[in-house]
Image (spheres, helix red, strand yellow):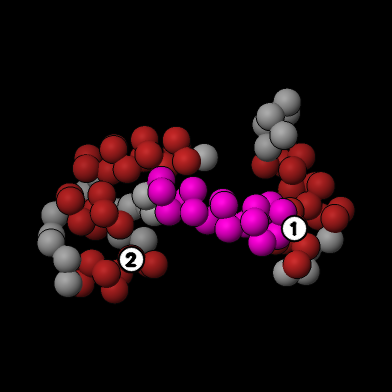
Amino acid sequence: MIADYHVTEQRMEAVPPRCARPVWCSRATRSSATGSSRAATCSAPPAPRWRGAITHLNDRFGGAAGYLQAHGASPESIARWREILIEPGRA
């Protein structure tokens, strides 16, 4: 997942700025530079941020499943999401 975000960040320079502004970064872009560099900055959190988020989930909840259960997801729902979202053989 982190590698995917890294590749996406590298390719965001080619995306027109009007198409690359997620809602979560609109406040940050108001005061930042304009143009494609802004798009690259706000396209996705950088890989180190994802590593930190994953580390937090693992340390505090034992992983994503523990986080989801702590916030109301049933074990059955989590099992189904795994079937749907994770490629066979990669779980």
Residues 23 and 32: in front is 32
Is residue 53 found inside the magenta-colored segment of the image?
yes
* Three-letter amino acid code of the residue under disc 1: Gly
Of the numbered discs in the image, which one, if any, rests on residue 8?
none
Q: Secondary structure at mark 1?
A: helix
In the displayed structure, 65 sits above or below 10; it is below
Does the image show residue 19? no
- The residue sitting at 81% across, 55% down in the picture is 77
Does the image show residue 8? yes
Q: In screen coordinates, is 14 left or right of 44? A: left
Which stretch did the figure color magenta? 47-64
Q: In screen coordinates, is 46 left or right of 55? A: left
Q: In screen coordinates, is 15 left or right of 35? A: right
Cα distance, mark 1 to mark 2?
28 Å
- Say whether disc 1 or disc 2 marks the residue closer to the N-terminus: 2
**Residue 50 location, x and y as percent?**
47, 51
Packing grade of label 1 (10 A; few <14, some 14-19, many >=20) is some
* Three-letter amino acid code of the residue under disc 2: Cys
| Residue tagged 1 | 66
State the residue lying farthest toward the front.
59
| Residue tagged 2 | 25
